[in-house]
Amino acid sequence: MRPKVGQDVPDLVLVHDWRGAITVDVVDWRAADHRRSDHGDIEVLGPDGTWKPSTEQPLAVARRHRSTAYEQFFAFPGDAREPGGTVRSVVVLPQCTGAQAEALLASGLGDPANAVLVWSGEDLTGRLQFLVDGPGSTPAPAASIERLRREMVIDGMVHHAVVPVRLSDNARLVVANAGRTHIRGVTGTAGSGKSFALTARAARLAAEGKSVLVLCFDLTLANHLRHLVVERCAEYGANPARVTCTSFHTFCSRVVDDAAQTGIFACEPARGTWPLKIVVKTRDVLEAGFERRFDAVLVDEGQDFTVDWWNMLREHVVRPDGEMLLVADATVDLYGKSTWDDPEALAAAGFTEPWIAMTSSYRMAPDLVRSTNEFARLFVADDAVVPEIAEDQALVVGRVSTATRTWRNVERVADLGASVGRGDRGGWLSGSPRVQPRPR
């Protein structure tokens, strides 16, 4: 079973407790039908007997596997930008001799600086110990190794036994999609269970054999959504590798990169920041014919998405008969993008059914919901959108005791975390021994 690391699916990922990790890609090329041209490009022999440029780029793919594994799932903030010897990659050409593999792919790109090695079938016996021993003796950080193991998705496997959070009645409506509606919207307050509903729907679709793309604006949230999906897949007997969870811009960057490897290139926009440019380039390559389709596209924290982004996904990414779901909380429009309250924009984006409203909060004790609602109406706005007290809260999250509230003035926003965790009298979290700083 091939592991999945983010959007990448290498043939193998080998992880050692202190040697680090290595991705392995096996390429079934033969010297008889592949060659390097005078210009350094790889050519493949076609059925008509002519040599044509190859659309496969094994070295580029291996380097991407390495960088993705390190940057998104191994390194922590403050770590080195380059993985060094802790995360490496190997491209194996089992049908080639060492000289043939060298002539086809090595060309200086497998040097230690890039840590992408090119092996032949002969090397599998002579160099296999390298996969265990690695190039150096400096132990890899234990927290990084644990994180990479936790983030990998393998067919039919979960890392530990879990009991997923019970779904509310409204969440079960989202998961079931009894009407088989192709485009749906869900709105809800913080703590209403929107993300649980979306990830459960993703798992249900995976159980039906569908390919699912789960998108959000923030990569950290994407990792959290992946964990929720894996838990639900275990519950539904689904293959979690059918679900791809990533941020919108990371997905766009991958589309542009993959399109370039097939010979479809996007012009660099003259102006704009990288997030703006990568979306323009993504639309360009999709409109030029590059295909990256999924049976379903589900968007979490949709208030961070523009209608234009949604329409690009609707026109070019989801299959014509596929399903789309957007969940949003308009009260948390951090990036000022939301236009989901415009009826004309909604109709143009394909929304024809009323949105499902998830209005209850399961995140706070009922008495705390009452007090925060009163605060919002007094000091935020008379018509502030406030959560309701969930009638089924005890069934969904268990009985919640009355909240204990303490008022503490904080001089600066930057001091809030320290005040919560390590303030006077041992900090607010001193009574929670399981809450500890992440080990480094």
Image (tube, rainbow, N blue to C red):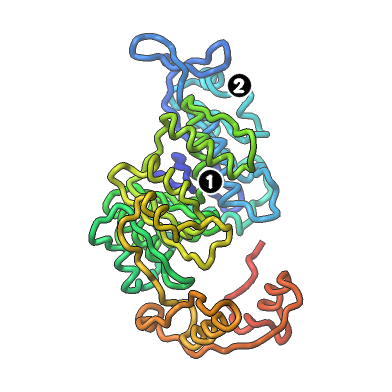
User: Quarter of the image containing the C terminus?
Assistant: bottom right
Mark found first going from the N terminus, 2 or 1? 2
Residue 238 placement, left or right of 428? left
Q: In this view, does 139 lie above or below 94?
A: below
Front residue (pair 264, 246): 264
- The disc placed on residue 107 is 2
Q: Name the residue under label 1.
A: 250
Give the structural element (helix, strand or loop) at label 1: helix
Q: How far from the left and from the top, in percent, is residue 352?
A: 31, 56
Question: What amino acid does circle 2 point to?
Answer: Ser
The quadrant holding residue 427 is bottom right
The quadrant holding residue 397 is bottom left
Q: Residue at x 51, y 39 (%)?
A: 254
User: Quarter of the image containing the N terminus?
Assistant: top left
Residue 414 visible to an observer of this rendering: yes
Q: Residue at x 50, y 38 (%)?
A: 282
Question: What amino acid does circle 1 point to?
Answer: Thr
Q: How far from the left and from the top, in percent, is residue 425?
A: 71, 87
Residue 6 placement, left or right of 138? left
Question: Within 10 angstroms of label 1, few (less than 14), some, or many (20 or more) residues?
Answer: some
Q: Which residue is drawn at 48% across and 37% down?
A: 283
Residue 223 visible to an observer of this rendering: no
Q: How far from the left and from the top, in percent, is residue 329?
A: 47, 65
Front residue (pair 295, 228): 295
Q: How far from the left and from the top, in percent, is residue 142?
A: 61, 58
